Amino acid sequence: MNRKSTLQDNQGASGRRINKSSKGTAKIENDKGWLRIRFTHQQKRYAFALGLPDTQLNRKVAADKAHKIELDILSDNFDATLEKYKSLKNNHKSSPQFLTGEDIIQRFIDRKAKTVSTPRSLEKYQTVLKYLQNFQCKDGNQKISLADLPLNIWTETHFEEFYEHLSKKLSPLTLKQYLVWLSAIWQWGIAEKMIKQEDPWLTLINRVKVPPKQMPKPFNRAEIHKIINGFEHSKYYSHYTDFVKFLFGTGCRTGEAIGLRWQHLNDDCSTVWIGESLSRGIRKATKTNRARTITLTPKLQKILGERRPDSFNPEALVFGSPLGNPIDDHNFRNRAWKSILNQVNVEYRKPYNTRHTLISHALDQGMSPVTVAQLTGHDVQTLYENYAGNVKSRPMLPEF
């Protein structure tokens, strides 16, 4: 069979047939800018959309599909349900060479969804996918979304152009993070033998220069006293006083304090085990996936001892909302925290800054960075990088 004579492209108006196809001949048509295939077999007419925009590249893909239909008709292997021939997205498992950028990201998300504790962890990959979908690259004389382009025809130019596109829209820090996520997806695809080329994002990651960022200013002793005093005497928010004291006194992450249960404290409330975090109703491991046990100060021990009921449920939360529900960190920050800081005339910084405050004060007092890292659950290397200016051993300029 002469393939050129059988695969007739309809170059006319949208959806209008120019040449009547012979029986068994699969014809490619344009239907309002989208490709479809039409043919007749055993006196029955068939027509189905490929789900692909009409571009030069996609017409080549459609031609392969049409040729496959014709061969199946000739060999009596025709699938009357058409499932075998429909859009590429329905046939990726049998045709991995047609995987697109969107396919590989979506497959990565589907696999990741089985292991993450919260759907929020997947939002970053969905955001990356949206940027890919919105970026148009050239396909002959037309343009096509980079997300719809099969990976096996991506070139260095595609990666470079997408990098330039992102660099114009994102800050260097965000750009680097997006490239790290793309690299993770590509590395997974390579390991799963879905991608044949090497990871191109690694080179682009190294190209991004992120300017140093100054750490937020910690609260000083006077400000800490004002904030706690503000909560203690607040008509509306005094309920959160112990919660705020615990944040300042332990330097734990906000979600760790919210998720604390009575079973995490020992009998006399002198030590606390921190290995879980609670955020927006989702309980999970700590950020570093490592647990730690902290010996509390006598003041904190007394606060928690007086707070614990004589008869308590070990599963119950140590700190809750006035209605007994888990504390919502957004509501706490936007209502209680902002109101109190404004009331006591303290410059606004997020509640998470209580962690930065404890670390900074501990280092300024000469506590070993290794010890501070153990208390706060930090990676030692990260602590040195982010808090080097607070370490007592930092070099000093000579005085003239």
Image (cartoon, helix red, strand yellow):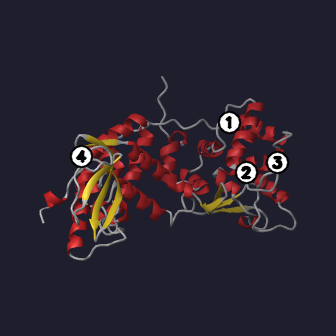
For the N terminus, the image quarter is bottom left
Q: CA distance from mark 1 to mark 2?
A: 16 Å
- Return the x and y of residue 25 as percentages of the image width and height: 22, 63
- Return the x and y of residue 243 as percentages of the image width and height: 75, 50
Q: Residue at x 54, y 50 (%)?
A: 369
User: Pointer 2: residues within 10 angstroms few (<14), some, or many (20+)?
Assistant: many
Q: Nearer the viewer, mark 4 or mark 3?
A: 4
Three-letter code, disc 4: Gln
Q: In the rendered structure, find residue 11 and report the number of the disc placed on it.
A: 4
Q: Are marks 1 and 4 in contact (CB under 8 Å)?
A: no
Q: Are marks 4 and 3 in contact (CB under 8 Å)?
A: no
Q: Which residue is mark 3?
A: 239
Q: How many marks?
A: 4
| Above or below for 34 versus 72 | above
The answer to which of 80 and 288 lies nearer the viewer is 80
Q: CA distance from mark 3 to mark 2?
A: 13 Å
Q: CA distance from mark 4 to mark 3?
A: 72 Å
Of callouts 1 and 4, the N-terminal one: 4
